[in-house]
Image (cartoon, rainbow, N blue to C red):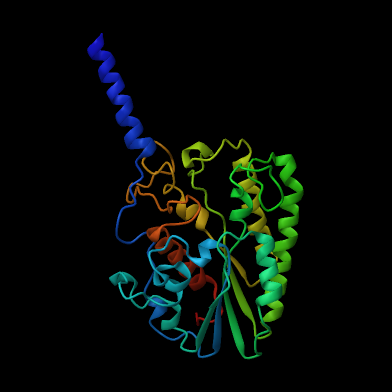
Amino acid sequence: MLVTAAILILAGVLYYREYKFARPVGSGPAGPPVAREPFQSIWSDRQIHVLGLGDSVTAGLGAKSTSHRYFSRVIENPADEFDAMQGCCLSAVLPNLTQENLAISGSESQVHLDVINDQLLQQPDDTFGIVLMTSGGNDLIHMYGRSPPRECAMYGATLDQALPWIANFQTRLTTMFQTIIGRFPGGCEIYIADIYDPTDGQGDAPSIFLPVWEDGLKIHKRYNRVINDVAQEFDNVFVVPMYETFLGHGSHCRQWWLDTYCEEDPHYWFFTNIEDPNDRGYDAIRRVFLNTIVANTTLRAR
């Protein structure tokens, strides 16, 4: 009996160590492949301004260097770029490109609207904008259950509490898009990522060291629905599938019995603060941004 009990205890310890707490980050490329063919010829010789807006994901918190932020890698390959991604960047196909990143780490969607209103300058008539954007994630996760939920910091809220805040986010996001478009009289395209889930769709907040949030997944789903619904109201706004891309790379990345398990890369793509990507996560994000741009941009001849 003692031997059996010892074996069961040891098995339990090994289980928790391997499948509950082990979160290896892996190495090498991460995320979907990017085809080289679209980057073999110039898309346009127009004046292009690439603009970053939003929170710490677009600001690049968690990347090992400035050149490894997704915003940077979409525009230009870093010195240590993977062979398969050499030349797969916007500067290779848009020779008259400028860039500006107005994203702020820790910012919520109301701040993003303020930044657009106050800091985004009216662009010249001959300039076309490519806007890379993440917004809404901090509205969900702040203030980590440490204070009562409120608009733009609703962690711990019930769905009923959150419904008016979700409606306000929809109005706010619509205003953001309208204002951005108005600041680019020469035209623009907006690429906004939906919001990933560090729990791999399980909703068990303690697995990412946060308090239980019973309605968290429901509110998260509503926020992503808003992003998709508002984007569909504009011909030049496109959703980048960050949520789907990161499934299987959160707190349950080692749990092979889940539908989200990624056998080819069962690794953790989040930074130590939980809410931002790590370096491999940023590689994956730049890939889905590039793929979404290639699939939708009007700058590229078909």
Q: In x, y percent, where is residue 66?
A: 42, 71
226 shown above or below 3: below
Instruction: Please name the residue shown 60% across and 84% down the image.
Output: 128
Name of the residue lying farthest toward the top: 1
Q: In x, y percent, where is residue 210?
A: 53, 40
Instruction: Please name the residue shown 36% across and 32% down the image.
Output: 16
- In the picture, measured across the screen, residue 32 lies left or right of residue 234, that is left
Instruction: Please name the residue shown 45% across and 77% down the image.
Output: 75
**Residue toward you, 42 or 202:** 202
Quadrant assignment, res 35: bottom left
Q: Quadrant of the N terminus?
A: top left
14 shown above or below 174: above
**Residue toward you, 133 or 113:** 113
Quadrant assignment, res 109: bottom right
- In the picture, measured across the screen, residue 125 lies left or right of residue 255, that is right
**Residue toward you, 270 or 290:** 270
Q: How many labels were placed on the picture? A: 0
Name of the residue lying farthest toward the front: 146
70 shown above or below 299: above
Q: Does residue 119 appear in the picture of this structure?
A: yes
**Residue toward you, 4 or 95:** 4
Q: Does residue 232 appear in the picture of this structure?
A: no
Q: In x, y percent, where is residue 107?
A: 61, 61
Q: In x, y percent, where is residue 96?
A: 49, 89
